[in-house]
Image (spheres, rainbow, N blue to C red):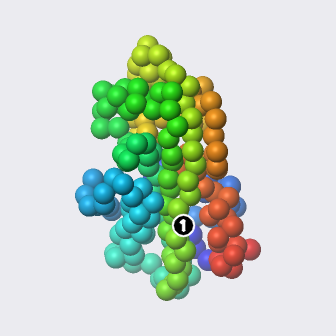
Amino acid sequence: MKYILVSTSPRRIELMKLIGVNFEVVKPKVDEGKIGIADEDPERFVKIMAERKCESVLKDCGFDLSDIVLISADTIVYLENRIIGKPRNRDDAIRTLKYLSGKWHSVFTGVCVIHRNERVEFVERTDVFFREIDDETIVEYVDSGEPLDKAGAYGIQGKASLFVRRIIGDFYNVMGFPVGRVWEELRRKGWIE
């Protein structure tokens, strides 16, 4: 069996290694800004994005699909009926962290796994509560560069761990890849031993 992770996210790559299979990394060919899903439906948004990432590789992959397992994921932060993806720039990251400060928010990750003509799709949700964060700390964190490529403008596994007061759900989901659930689904389908 050959496994392909349809993501170039360093966090997803590291977490995929925990499953214990050899895999290749392929960059998805999806414009994340043009999906046309209303902000009110975060589960549908991440599910469709994960599907589109896998399908973008299926279209012109050139692989023999009979022994391939494609795995993709998409993660967003959701607060007050608003989807928050990766920040566009430094100012957007600062605004986002001020918005999250002192509040609960939800992290949704959609996962799509395709093998032959079968698919497994699911959405994982984790709720996170941030402490109140002062403006100086937010600016210092943003200027570290850590949040600029992450949904919600923070990495829970990095310095932003200091902002987290409480978490309900899968920690790794907040990192962008609910690895335990992926492993469980692959085993359930018999796609890994």
Q: Quadrant of residue 120?
A: bottom right
- Across and down, in percent, residue 110 comes to 49, 61
- The quadrant the C terminus occupies is bottom right
Mark 1 secondary-structure assignment: strand
In the displayed structure, 4 sits above or below 151; it is: below
- Across and down, in percent, residue 12 comes to 54, 52
Circle 1 is placed at which residue position? 122
The foreground one among 106 and 91 is 106
The foreground one among 24 and 161 is 161
- Across and down, in percent, residue 49 comes to 39, 62
Residue 11 visible within the image: no
Residue 153 visible within the image: yes
Q: Residue at position x 47%, y 16% from top? A: 134
In the displayed structure, 92 sits above or below 118; it is: above
Q: Quadrant of residue 77?
A: top left
In the displayed structure, 50 sits above or below 132; it is: below
In the displayed structure, 109 sits above or below 95; it is: below
For the image, the number of numbered tags is 1
- Across and down, in percent, residue 16 comes to 61, 57
**Residue placed farthest to the top in the image?**
136
Q: Residue at position x 52%, y 22% from top? A: 132
Q: Residue at position x 40%, y 42% from top? A: 80
- The quadrant the N terminus occupies is bottom right
| Amino acid at circle 1 | Phe
Q: Residue at position x 36%, y 54% from top? A: 40
Badge 1, how many Cα within 10 Å: few under 14, some, many 20+? Answer: some
1 sits to left or right of 106: right
